[in-house]
Image (cartoon, helix red, strand yellow):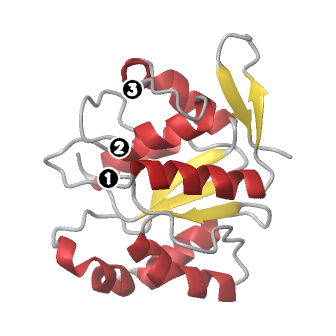
Amino acid sequence: MDSFERENLRIHYRPEKIKWLLVAEAPPLDDHDRFFYRKKVDKFDTLYLETMHVLYFEENERKTGRLRNEKPYFLKNFQDDGFYLIDALTEPIKDKRRKVSILRKGSKSAIKRIEDIAGKDTKVILISRPVFIVLHKPLIEKKVVVINKGVIPFPIGCNDIFRVELRTVLLENGWRKTIHPDNSEPNHNASK
């Protein structure tokens, strides 16, 4: 999957008004096909799974099969609730040992994209230690509303910590659980 395909998938689920902007590191390597907005993914989609578990299920409820089988439904809820996920970098990181330095090199472009996407009321959440280290201070200096004051780790190997930290920062910033309009699925309203 190339950057053009990824961006088309991402834009398809862009909310009219972005209330919550999640910023991860970079798209996955092309050989993995586990892009967050890709409709059919059956492995290595931890960021999507853990984010949706936080937003649309009770704290200890695990619905991995359902999240994969009904991905367009959950992505539509994500969009309708004002959530949008982008990557700090537009291309995959091939050398994982150099994440921070690679992110630093792309930081000006990342900050510009975030500023262009985020409205004055958009709440930005930085996901992963390298993204937080590189972007937190410059975004705060530019008056972007970054709501996590500490690292929210990428969920691979830190799933429990990711869920707790993401849920906590959302709740502390006005996110409230509501019932989906058809009364059949838990959903969360992105507004106060």
Q: Which residue is mark 1?
A: 156
Q: Which residue is mark 3?
A: 64
Q: Quadrant of the N terminus?
A: top left
At horizontal 69% and vertical 38% (from top left) the residue drawn is 81
Asked if the residue under mark 3 is in contact with the one under mark 1, i.e. CB atoms within 8 Å, the reply is no
SS for callout 2: helix
Query: Residue 174: x and y, percent?
Result: 81, 51
At horizontal 64% and vertical 64% (from top left) the residue drawn is 124
Q: Amino acid at mark 3?
A: Thr
At horizontal 68% and vertical 28% (from top left) the residue drawn is 187
Query: Residue 29: x and y, percent?
Result: 20, 55
Q: Which residue is mark 2?
A: 46
Residue 1 visible in the current orientation: yes
Residue 20 visible in the current orientation: no
Disc 1 and disc 2: Cα gap in Å?
6 Å
Farthest residue to the right: give it. 192
Q: Amino acid at mark 2?
A: Thr
SS for callout 3: helix
